Amino acid sequence: MTGDDLRAKLTSPHKGATLAIVAAALGYFVDVYDLWLYSVLRVKSLNGLGITDDAQVKALGEMLLNWQMGGFLVGALAFGLMADRKGRLTVLFGSILLYSAANIANGFVQDVTWYAVCRFVAGVGLAGELGAGIALVSELVPKDKRGWATTIVATIGVAGSVAAALFGKNFEWRTGYWVGGGMGLILLLIRLGVYESGMFEGVLKNSNVRRGDFLSIFRRAESTSRYLATIFVGAPVWFFAAMFMTFSKELQDALGVVPPHSAPDIVMIGAIGLTFGDVIFGALSQIWRSRRKAIGAALALMTLSVAAIFFFGHSPAAFYWLMLAAGIAAGYWAVFVTTAGETFGTNLRGTVAISAPCFVRGMVIPMTLVRGQLTPSLGILGATATVGLIMLAMAVWSVWRLPETYGRDLDFIEGGEPVPSIA
């Protein structure tokens, strides 16, 4: 075999797609590990910093979560534009490097102020991970196998929450952040073998195409509606993740669950549900040849399972197993991120694929603020249920509004005409 033959084999489309899937999956694993590590370590880390009052732990825990989600919003715009202007790989390298540095620093914090700074910077870094990976994989994998590939990425990624729960339960909190930073640096080396999407390189050569023009989304009512629907369809996932998993202690107190489950245990069972849900609904979107039908089925199951927690989740056993059911329902994240990567053209795909999941996560900020405002009059259960109804209603509207993207050829440019849906 000649040197040219070997080079051609190593850079074949099949090889490139496989490496991209591995790199994106491991990147999302690190992303999810970090997000849920904070949920697991929220109480333990604040106690370690000398904060033991329950009310303070709750308030400061919400503040730190909001700072992290705020970082996602900033990173969504910065890395989204970078993905469409400089390339998907630029984001995959830059985001993981920034995240790794922030997490290593997080292990050394001595007060809440620096804790918030590190969570914000880590959020900025992680913002580019999932979307850039999904955009790259979507453009490298054949359209009939795209849903399977993105399901693999999302499922392996969500398994990071299981790792976070196990690690947070059994090790010291500072060590958890150092491990996250170390995994990021290792991942940086793995990505050296990944190459750029041919679709993006084709657009890059065309100087007449405007790439990463975020504001162009809002210049037409149709694309604005399509973008908002892309975001809102994923909102119930993070309603469950934040309101039920991150703040499970407060929810169990309100429901009268005695004795309550620990945060690591609830994150663990919820994460197992999310992992199974990603496989189930990702597979259904391929079998049914419809992203919309899979998301609709997940939303129906989520409505039933969340309602069951409010009405029947008063015992430890009932709460535990209903959290598993709700986690499975919320596991349509794989279908959501696949849809985000398929809905817009190549010149805006990175921007949308990165910003939409980040804005979904960023919606945790208004969710927690609205719940906080409603709690004095409705109680934590009534306030949580109200926020949930709003999120589910927005998601149902979004499913109706979004085009069906299963099997779509992604080699197109976002222009002046509406993108036709595929029946």
Image: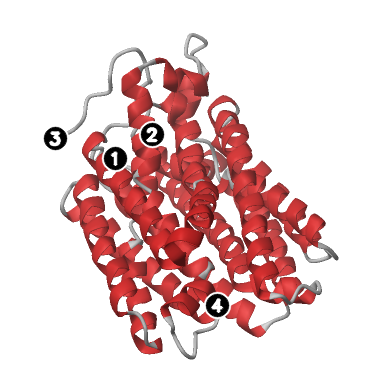
Precedes in sequence: disc 4 or disc 3: 4
Q: CA distance from mark 4 to mark 3?
A: 43 Å
- Under circle 1, the secondary element is helix
Q: Name the mark nearer the viewer: 3 or 1.
A: 1
Give the image quarter of residue 168.
Answer: bottom right
Can residue 251 be seen here? The reply is yes
What residue is disc 2 on?
A: 228
Horizontal side of 274 relative to 174 (left or right) equals: left
What type is the residue that disc 1 sits on? Ser
Identify the residue at the far front of this view: 377
Precedes in sequence: disc 1 or disc 2: 2
Q: Could you say which is closer to the camera, residue 369 or residue 93?
A: 369
Precedes in sequence: disc 2 or disc 4: 2
What residue is disc 1 on?
A: 398
What type is the residue that disc 4 sits on? Ala
Q: Residues within 10 Å of mark 4 (few under 14, many from 20)?
A: many
Could you say which disc has been placed on residue 423 in the image?
A: 3
